[in-house]
Image (tube, rainbow, N blue to C red):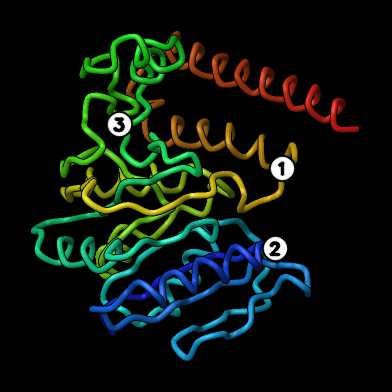
Amino acid sequence: MELSIIIINKDTKKLTEEAISSAVKTIKKIKFEIVVVDNSSRKENVVEKIYDNVIVVKDVVNKGFSNACNIGARVACGEVLLFLNSDTVLFKNTVDEAFSFFKKQKNVGALGVRQLLENGKLDAGCKRGFPTPLNSLYYFLGFSKLFPKSKRFGAYQQTFIDEHDVVEVDCISGAFMLIFKKTFNFVGGFDEDYFLYGEDVDICYRLKKAGFKNIYYGKVSFLHFKNKSGEKDLKVLESFYNSMKIFYNKHYKNKYNFIVNWMVEKGINFKLWLAKRNFNKVSLKDD
C-alpha cells in the first residue's frame, strides 16, 4: 500500500463522508486506503464503510485528537501517511502531485500544501514559523500585517513566502500532513498531551530537531471548512490555549529566563480571558 489517509470523525459524519468522497474521486495515480477513526461519535454520526478501500475503526474512547491519529497510524498499512481533517475537500491532482513530489525529497519530515478557506483566501496556518516568544509577540502586536514582507516581523505566519512557492518551513498544518510512516514512528507519533490543537506544531518541531525538513508545497491546494470539525464550547477554547502552554513548557521554558516565562504565561492567560469574554458575549446574543 502506497498511501494511508487518516481521518478522525467526531460527530462530523456529513463532512467526513464529503472528505472521503473527494479523496476517492480525485486520487488517480496512487494505491491508497482511507482509515477513519471514530472518536466516540454519537450513534447517528458514526461513519459506515462507503467504499471498498475504507476502514472504519469504531468504539474508540475519546482521549483526544492526537490519540485518535496515533490509533489510525497503527492501523494504517501505507508506506506514507496523510493526516487529513474531516472538514476538508480535496481538489483534482492535490494528493497525486503532492505525493509524487514528497516521495522524491531527501530527508523529508512532513509536507503540507496550500490551504484555502471557503472565501478562497489562504489559511495562513498552512505555513508557519515556530511560536517563539519573539515571533508570537510580533504576531499578537500585528506587526506581521504591517510588515508582511519582513522575515523578522512575519516569521510566525511566514507572510514573506508567496502562497504558491515550494519552500522549507518550520511547520505545516495538520489539516493536510504527509509523512512517511517510519518517520512518524521514529519521532514517536503525535504527543497525546495535546487533547486538541498544537499536535501538528509539536511534531513538526520534533521532526526538525531530529534533522528532517518540513516542506510547504504551494502548487496544489485543498479546501478547509475551518472550525467546523468540532463542537464550539469552552472546552475546545481552553484546549486551544492550553496547547500553547504545553508546547512552550515542553520546548522553550528551559531556554528562557524567569521573566520571559512569566510574561508568556500571563500573555496566554490574558488571551484566554479575552477569548472567553468574547465567547460569552456571542453566546448571550445567540440566546
- Looking at the rendered structure, the kind of residue marked 1 is Lys
Farthest-out residue, right = 287
264 versus 13 height, above or below = above
Query: Which image quadrant for residue 280?
Result: top right
Which residue does the numbered mark 2 point to in the structure image?
Answer: 11
Per the image, label 3 sits on a secondary structure element best described as loop
Per the image, label 1 sits on a secondary structure element best described as loop
The answer to the question of whether label 3 and label 2 lie on touching residues, with beta carbons closer than 8 A, is no
Q: Nearer the viewer, residue 186 or 55?
A: 55
Q: Residue visible at 78% across and 73% down?
A: 44
Looking at the image, residue 280 sits to the left or right of residue 24; the answer is right
Which residue does the numbered mark 3 point to in the structure image?
Answer: 129
- Residue 194 x, y percent position in the rendering: 53, 47
Separation (CA) of disc 3 from disc 2: 32 Å
- Residue 111 x, y percent position in the rendering: 26, 53
For disc 3, the neighbor class at 10 Å (few under 14, some 14 to 19, many from 20) is many
Q: Nearer the viewer, residue 181 or 34?
A: 34
Name the disc covering residue 232, or none: 1
Looking at the image, residue 42 sits to the left or right of residue 202; the answer is right
Q: Nearer the viewer, mark 3 or mark 1?
A: 1
Q: Residue visible at 46% across and 60% down?
A: 89
